[in-house]
Image: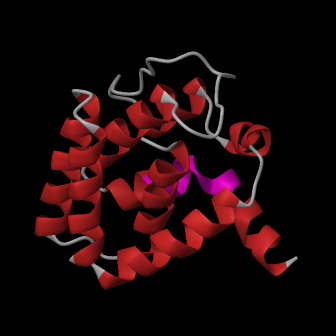
Amino acid sequence: MNTNILLALLLGLQEIELTPETKSSLKQLSRLIKFKSDSEDIQEQLDTILANNVALNQNYQVAKGALDALDSQTILGLLPTKDEIRQAIPSGDGERGYHPGEYDGKDNYEIGNDLIIIINQEEPAEVSKTLLQRLRDFLATFRTG
């Protein structure tokens, strides 16, 4: 799964109220990613989530466009560190399964793992906002500047 898609989803979550149904659908998406399901199944679940939540879809599309305009090394430098994840999620759920610095702009299991961790929190929008603040701030200045 393309990493920018996953990041755009996490960024898209930040400014909306998540319904119990959306949270449930997001958890299903995280399970598909966790168990490395077929990319088509993951994309189908994502498409369903976006189709059922107009605000999330709008936020996602804006974030995806901005991320696609950046080079992978810029994005890598703006992602949360392992320590930042541990501070935001002190329960020990913050372990990442991929090595930093290997983001190629396409597939990165570390970011997939981050998505799984964030989505499975009680308030995924708030955790996403905390962990992706640097990226979010950069995209805001990138879009306006």
Residue 121 visible in the picture: no
x then y, percent, for residue 13: 40, 65
Residue at position x 26%, y 70% in the image: 18
Residue 68 appears left or right of 91:
right
Q: Quadrant of residue 91?
A: top left
Q: Residue furthest right?
A: 145
Residue 108 visible in the picture: yes
Which sits in the foreground, 34 or 89? Answer: 34
Query: Is 42 inside the magenta-drawn segment?
Result: no
Query: Is 130 inside the magenta-drawn segment?
Result: yes
x then y, percent, for residue 64: 56, 64
Q: Main secondary structure of the magenta part?
A: helix
Q: Is residue 89 above or below residue 6?
A: above
Residue at position x 45%, y 74% in the image: 15
x then y, percent, for residue 52: 21, 77
Q: Quadrant of residue 121?
A: top left
Query: Considering the image in quadrants, where does the N terminus appear?
Result: top left
In the image, the segment drawn in magenta is: 128-135
Q: Is residue 41 above or below residue 77?
A: below
Q: Quadrant of residue 33?
A: top left
Q: Residue furthest bottom?
A: 54
Q: Is residue 107 above or below residue 137?
A: above
Which sits in the foreground, 14 or 32? Answer: 32
Residue 90 appears left or right of 144:
left
